[in-house]
Amino acid sequence: MASKILATILLIGGKNMRIGVNKGAIVIWENGLIKRYPSLGSIYSLIHDRTCIDKIEYSLLQNTPSLELPIQSSKIICLAKNFPAHAKEMGVEPVNLPANPDLFLKPKSALIGPEENVIFPPQVQQVDHEVELALIIGKEGKNISLEDSFEYVFGYTILLDMTARDIQAVAKKKGRPWFPSKGFDTFSPIGPVIVTSDEIDDPHILNIELKLNGQVKQKGNTRDMIFTIDRIINYCSSIVTLEPGDIIATGTPSGVGPVNRGDKISATIERIGTLEVGVI
Ligand code: MG
């Protein structure tokens, strides 16, 4: 089913077009005709120079693309404790919540796409699921103001911030970095699509849900975020240059819990879709 892999619909030059992935490259296509792009940045330039659209040379889509990673990224920035109920379940009282977003990085080697599998590392006792709204950055920026922040959002997707909870618990106790608990290969499934920002007027009213083997485990709404998206972009860009394709995961609602080998995770965010992955 070709439509299954379509990522999102863009209005470019008055036409309905779709953006997605094919064989690891980002593609734009229309009526079965496809053009491949090497990076999200090049697509961003394209859609912001709408006169270019008529110059695209389409090639016929020869085979049925598989669901694959929707983007190429240089970094994945994650927020910890951005929902009060989750902070509470992790033992953090409201008075101890940080004044600025609490950030950590995940490596791009942790990314996998829809319908792939999270690999449960043999040296880990407990792997937890955390469903999160992820921003995809569309243009380079440093010290981005609150007012300008949404200009830098290319779109939205779902990210699973898989966490080795036992390793993280030791790290927290001993004041060590979170990287070993968050950075394992396959610990950042994303997808199934990038919905461009023009399709979501208000990203702060989206329902978030995660089911494990069909059972609801996490349920929340982005309205409960402690730090809103403008604040997140403003703060992150005060530290690092945000680049096209960068991912910012905005934190998980409450209900995090362990997964086991053989489990099926199904993560849904309103207006975006459902990301399904397995655990092996
Ligand atoms: Mg998280």
Image (cartoon, rainbow, N blue to C red):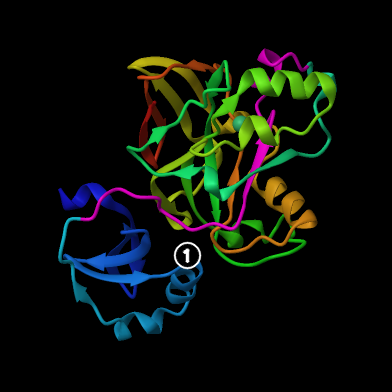
Which picture quadrant has residue 23?
A: bottom left
Name the residue carrying label 1.
Answer: 40
Q: Is residue 75 left or right of residue 211?
A: right
Q: Quadrant of the C terminus?
A: top left
Quick check: is 75 in the magenta stretch?
yes
Q: Position of residue 60 (x, y in %)?
A: 16, 72
Residue 28 lies, with reference to residue 149, above or below; the image says below
Q: Position of residue 232 (x, y in %)?
A: 69, 46
Range of magenta residues? 65-92
Residue located 39% across and 42% down the image: 272
**Principal SS element in the magenta part?**
loop
Number of disc labels: 1
In the depicted view, which residue is nearer to us: 265 or 280? 280
In the depicted view, which residue is nearer to us: 195 or 178? 178
Residue located 65% across and 29% down the image: 181
On the question of residue 186 being in view, the answer is yes
In the depicted view, which residue is nearer to us: 61 or 170? 170
Which picture quadrant has residue 243?
A: bottom right
Kindly state the secondary structure of the residue where label 1 is placed: helix
Residue 173 lies, with reference to residue 28, above or below; the image says above
Q: What amino acid type is highlighted by mark number 1?
A: Leu
Quick check: is 189 in the magenta stretch?
no
Residue 134 lies, with reference to residue 70, above or below; the image says above
Q: Is residue 53 left or right of residue 61?
A: right
Does any atom of ligand 1 lie closer than 8 Å to the CB of label 1? no
On the question of residue 251 being in view, the answer is no
Q: Position of residue 102 (x, y in %)?
A: 76, 36
Q: Position of residue 257 (x, y in %)?
A: 53, 15
Q: Quarter for ligand 1?
A: top right
